[in-house]
Image (cartoon, helix red, strand yellow):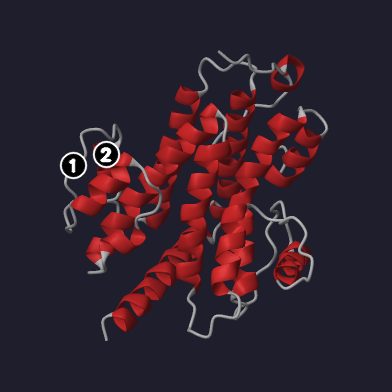
Amino acid sequence: MITKRQYHCLISGLPNLSFDGEKPWTSPAEFREMLAGELHPDDYAQVELVFLKEDNINLSYYLLPDEEEPQRPGVFNNTDFKEQEENFSAILPSDDILPLYMVNVMRENLGDETKKRRLDIQNALSDGYFEHIMERGCSFLKEYTRFDYDLNNLISFIKAGRHDLNQEDFIRGMTEHAGHLAANPGKSPVKDPEFEYFDEIMSYSESRSFSDQELKFDKLRWRVIDHMIFFENFSIDSIMGYLQKLLIADRWSELRKESGEKRLREIITATVEEAEEKYTDINK
C-alpha cells in the first residue's frame, strides 16, 4: 500500500467553503498558485491535471478561432499551442509540450480541409482527457472524474432525447454507465442499477428552471466529494476534493448574480443549437 504524503498545516488552515453565493476567499487560479509552493511536485501535478479541462476549451478555440473567447486559466496558453504546432513540422522535432491526447487532437485537426466543428473537437478532447486522468490521476481524481462523466452523460442523454438528437453522440468517457446508456437509447433512459445516483439525477432533470437543475447537480457533486474524501484528512486526495469544491463555489459566486438564470439558459441553448446543427448536417 502506497503511503500518501500528509499536509496537516496546509489543510488545517484552509477556510470552509459553502454554497452561500458569496465570492470564495480565493479564486481557483490563485489557489493553484498557492499550492505550487506548498505541495510536492508529484502532488502538484495532480492539481495541473484538473486545470487541463480549461486547456481543452482554450485549445478548441485555438484550432477553430471563429469566435472570440478569453483565455481560461489552464496549464498552457496559445504560445504553447503555437510552439507545439511548429514542432510538428520541425526538421528535428523536440519533445511534445502538450499531453499526448492534446497532441493527437491537434494533429487530426490542423490543416484539415473539411469543415471542423467545435463540438467534435471538444468531444475528442473530452474523451482524451478522461483516459489521461484514468492513467495519471490520484485515487480521488479518478473516482470523481468517473462520477462526473457519468453525471454529465446522463444529463446530456436526457436532453438529447428531448430534442430528438442522436444520444450516443453525447456520451463521453469509457465508463460502465456510459456503456449502459449507449446500449439503451430512448427518450426515457433505462435505469442503470449500478449507478447509485441515477434516480436522483432523473428527478432533478425534471425541473423547469435551469438554475435550479444546475444548483441541485452541483450540490450532488459537493456531497459526493465529501463522501469520497471523508477518510482522507490530510492527503492530496483531500486537497483535490477541496479544489473541486472551490471550483463549484467560484462558479456559483458568478451564476448567482442577477444574470445567473439568463447566462445558464444562454449556455444550454448554444450547446443544443450547435448539436442540432451538427445532427442536421449529418443526416442530409
Q: Nearer the viewer, residue 125 or 156?
A: 125
Residue 118 against residue 250 in the figure, above or below: below
Can residue 21 be seen at all in this image of the molecule? no
Q: Secondary structure at mark 2?
A: helix
Identify the residue at image location x=74%, y=61%.
77
Q: CA distance from mark 2 to mark 1?
A: 7 Å
Identify the residue at image location x=72%, y=34%.
44
Q: Based on the displayed image, in which of its 4 quarters is residue 167 positioned? A: bottom left
Kind of residue at badge 1:
Lys
Q: Nearer the viewer, residue 67 or 86?
A: 86
Q: Based on the displayed image, in which of its 4 quarters is residue 95 positioned? A: bottom right
The residue to which callout 1 is attached is 191
Count of labels shown?
2
Q: Secondary structure at mark 1?
A: loop
Identify the residue at image location x=26%, y=81%.
283
- Image quarter (top left, top right, bottom left or bottom right) of the N terminus: top right
Asked whether, in this view, residue 275 is left or right of residue 136, the answer is: left
- Image quarter (top left, top right, bottom left or bottom right) of the C terminus: bottom left
The residue to which callout 2 is attached is 198
- Residue 83's spot in the image, x, y percent? 77, 66
Is there CB contact under 8 Å for labels 2 and 1?
yes
